Image (spheres, rainbow, N blue to C red):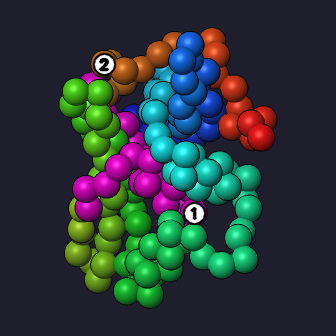
Amino acid sequence: MLVAEVFGVFIAKGKFASSPVVVLRAEDGRILPIYIGLAEASAIYSALNHYLPPRPMTHDLLVDIISKLNGKVEKIVIDDLIDTTFYARIVLKQNEKEIEIDARPSDSIAIALRIPCPIYVDPKVLDEAGLEELPEGFVDFGQIS
């Protein structure tokens, strides 16, 4: 597994439509664009920019619930890519017991940024979908109004 960090949240401008994208950068320098929903993009962007809403949003609520149940998010693992769909696991520890939860990468990343905890990417995922540089047409999510 390779450690990755969130490089940024972008809007991928296409010929006919635009889509939100979270981009991870692995420790080997490759980047991994993951197309996500608008709500998840907002949640990730908010966490990256340390924005605290007046009331808990869904990912904040999940982090609070995990904590109150004496759990701790140990890591996020993005470990598969099947038919253009990325798969991730949230790895928790509760009372010395490890618990793995299947989750969308976007939700996993939004939670990881709030904890914070490490994000790992399986090298086979990077081999299949990783890029050397950010594609043209990616605009910073914060520049969209």
Q: Tell which of 138 and 131 is nearer to you.
A: 138
Q: Position of residue 128 (x, y in %)?
A: 31, 19
Residue at the disc numbered 1: 114
Asked whether residue 117 is in view, the answer is no
Q: Position of residue 122 (x, y in %)?
A: 31, 34
Q: Amino acid at mark 1?
A: Arg
Q: Quadrant of the N terminus?
A: top left
Q: Secondary structure at mark 2?
A: helix
Residue under the image location 61 percent in, 21 percent down: 13
Q: Position of residue 74 (x, y in %)?
A: 39, 62
Tell whether position 60 is magenta: no
The picture quadrant where one finds residue 120 is: top left
The span shown in magenta is 101-124
Q: Secondary structure at mark 1?
A: helix
Question: Which mark is first along the chain, 1 or 2?
Answer: 1
Disc 2: CA contacts within 10 A as few (<14), some (14-19) or many (>=20): few
**Position of residue 82 in the picture relative to residue 94 (left or right):** left
Disc 1: CA contacts within 10 A as few (<14), some (14-19) or many (>=20): some
Residue at the disc numbered 2: 128
Q: Which mark is residue 39?
A: none
Q: Quadrant of the C terminus?
A: top right
Asked whether residue 113 is in view, the answer is yes
Residue under the image location 78 percent in, 35 percent down: 143
Q: Position of residue 39 (x, y in %)?
A: 54, 52
Q: Amino acid at mark 2?
A: Glu
Residue under the image location 62 percent in, 30 percent down: 11
